[in-house]
Image (cartoon, grey):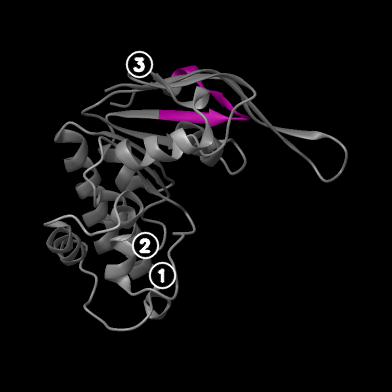
């Protein structure tokens, strides 16, 4: 299913008196079965675009569509339900619950969906942590290294097998070996038919992308839409 941004405009109030234009008439499409990398300098609107695509922030102008659904037209509870059903999100700051262990964090999306844990999800969560090479360790996730926490966040995003994966710098805290492993995993997810959109400065990720979208001052740069 295609995810698309249609002429998005997004501004934030500045503490000084003006406003910051994060996205300026931005239009882009992200197809199922493809890995798309979003690149650009700091402040170019990359994370803002990812959050708009996820329905976390609402643009003042334009639309975000996923198939026939206009995401930003949904009310907040509907957007929350849409994300839970369709979207796995990896945040740059991980957004893990420090007091829970790794397995508890991975299982959080299932607990938002149902009071009881659906059959098979405990095994899936355990398998995902093993695939991400997160060591089995009792105690809160805050005791893990940043690289391990990042891999927990990715496992959590994949728990419910979403059709759409949005990841903000998913390899930033990883060493070269683990970064390559995660980059290849994201590519494999795209090849399985999922829509995968990744904000990244990592050449390993960008080199595997089917498409590269470069942003500058909240706009897509025409010469950079498709990678080799």
Question: Where is 105 relative to 80, above or below?
Answer: below
Q: Secondary structure at mark 3?
A: loop
Q: Which mark is residue 150?
A: 2
Q: Is residue 73 left or right of residue 177?
A: right
What is the magenta range? 213-223
Residue 59 screen position, x and y as percent: 60, 27
Q: Earlier in the sequence, mark 1 or mark 3?
A: 3
Q: Is residue 219 magenta?
A: yes
Q: Residues within 10 Å of mark 2 (few under 14, many from 20)?
A: many
Q: Nearer the viewer, residue 46 or 67?
A: 67
| Spatial CA span between label 1 and label 3 | 38 Å
**Which callout, 1 or 3, points to the residue nearer the camera?**
3
Given this view, does label 3 or label 2 mark the residue nearer the observer?
A: 3
Q: In the rendered image, which residue does mark 3 sit on?
A: 68
Q: Position of residue 216 (x, y in %)?
A: 58, 30
Give the alpha-carbon distance from disc 2 to disc 1, as whole Å.
6 Å
Inspect this view and state whether residue 54 appears. Answer: no
Tell me the number on the disc at residue 223: none
Q: Mark 1 and mark 2 in contact (Cβ < 8 Å)? A: yes
**Mark 1: which secondary structure?**
helix
Which residue is pictured at 17% across the width and 31% down the height? 193
Is 26 inside the magenta-drawn segment?
no
- Marks counted in the figure total 3
How dense is the environment of label 3, judged by Cα within 10 Å: few (below 14), some, or many (20 and up)? Answer: few
Give the labeled residue for mark 1. Answer: 146
Q: Nearer the viewer, residue 154 or 186?
A: 154
First of labels 3, 2 by sequence position: 3
> In the displayed structure, does residue 78 sit left or right of residue 32?
right
Vertical order, 126 against 171 (above or below): below
């Amino acid at each position: 299913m295609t995810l698309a941004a249609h002429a998005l405009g997004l501004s934030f109030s500045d503490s000084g008196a003006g406003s910051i234009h994060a996205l300026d008439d931005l239009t882009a499409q992200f197809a199922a079965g493809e890995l798309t990398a979003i690149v650009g300098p700091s402040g170019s609107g990359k994370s803002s675009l990812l959050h708009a695509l996820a329905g976390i922030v609402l643009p003042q102008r334009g639309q975000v569509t996923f198939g026939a659904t206009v995401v930003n037209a949904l009310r907040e509870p509907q957007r929350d339900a849409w994300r839970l059903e369709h979207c796995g999100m990896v945040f740059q700051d991980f957004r893990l619950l420090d007091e829970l262990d790794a397995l508890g964090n991975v299982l959080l999306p299932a607990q938002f969906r149902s009071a009881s844990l659906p059959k098979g999800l405990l095994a899936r969560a355990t398998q995902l942590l093993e695939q991400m090479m997160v060591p089995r360790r009792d105690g809160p996730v805050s005791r893990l290294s940043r690289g391990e926490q990042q891999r927990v966040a990715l496992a959590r995003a994949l728990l419910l097998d979403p059709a759409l994966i949005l990841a903000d710098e998913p390899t930033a805290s990883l060493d070269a070996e683990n970064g390559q492993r995660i980059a290849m995993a994201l590519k494999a997810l795209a090849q399985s038919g999922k829509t995968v959109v990744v904000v990244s400065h990592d050449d390993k990720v960008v080199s595997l992308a089917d498409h590269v979208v470069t942003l500058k001052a909240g706009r897509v740069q025409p010469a950079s839409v498709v990678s080799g």
